[in-house]
Amino acid sequence: MKTIRTLLFAAIAACAGLAAFIYSGSYPVGADVRHTAFTHWALETLRDRSIDRAAASIEVPALDDPELLLMGGPDYNDMCTGCHLKPGLEESDLSVGLYPAPPDLTEKAADPRRQFWVIKHGIKASGMPAWGPTHDDQRIWAMVAFLQKLPDLNAQQYQILTARDDDDAGDHH
Amino acid sequence: MKSLTAPILLAALFTATATQAHDPSLHKNKGEKPKCEAMENMDHSKMDPNDPVMQAMMKKCMDQLHEESDSAGHHGDSHQPEK
């Protein structure tokens, strides 16, 4: 009985301490101050596990269609390069200033399921918006198709695939 | 009543802007034309015709070539040189 009372007291004290910490305003929330190692690990793990779980059941369509590249390329160039860069652009104000730092998508292609889910739903408190409310699945898959090829593109190939000329309003269908 | 005019107009403007925010046509004319002349300098022997990237580039540049030939007076119904 004494042990239970002690544990209960410890739990209440921990909750009170946590509440006091939250209300104290002492945790630095500026993007130019890094998280502690523990907070960083906890948030990264929480994010990755959540995305893995949510994206596991997504079925990936065929992504090797040139039309998808031509649809997704201009969208990527318009909406994503400010944070996620492009061939020939190694950093930007946003890629340097955001924390957590947005991934450089020209380096390595991630799992297409994860890419689709993140583009559609965004990530809380990271600067990554949810594009799902304003972009249909086909348009998001086109961006994923482009992202799968992006690490292998040179600057010239990138320019041709992402150029949005006068007759190209972003919808090829 | 008069005092409500400004808020109503602002709300209507905001609504109209929000519904157009992601209209693909808003991107029209925002970008630049594909620089297809770069393809001429590429090593064609190393190009894989089955590569989706290559196919997409060819399609993009073919479209541009058609546009240029159309604007130069060569219409799709005739490939004969002008006399």
Image (cartoon, rainbow, N blue to C red):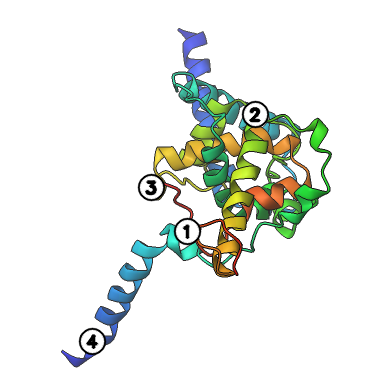
Relative to B67, residue A173 above or below? above
Crowdedness near tag 1: few (<14), some (14–19) or many (≥20) residues, C-alpha within 10 Å: some
Left or right relative to A13: residue A95: right
Which residue is denoted by mark 3 in the rendering?
Answer: A133
Crowdedness near tag 4: few (<14), some (14–19) or many (≥20) residues, C-alpha within 10 Å: few
Residue positioned 68% across, 30% down in the render: B49
Q: Position of residue A2 (x, y in %)?
A: 49, 10
- The CA span between labels 2 and 4 is 51 Å
Write down the chain letter for disc 1.
A
Q: Position of residue B3 (x, y in %)?
A: 23, 89
Relative to A127, residue A137 above or below? above
Which residue is denoted by mark 1 in the rendering?
Answer: A169
Which of the 4 quarters of the picture holds residue A143?
top right
Secondary structure under the numbered disc 1 in the rendered image: loop
Residue positioned 72% across, 41% down in the render: A104
Q: Pointers 4 and 1 in contact (CB under 8 A)? A: no
Q: Pointers 1 and 3 in contact (CB under 8 A)? A: no
Which residue is denoted by mark 2 in the rendering?
Answer: A110
- The CA span between labels 3 and 2 is 23 Å
The kind of residue on which mark 3 rests is Pro
Disc number lying in front (1 or 3): 1
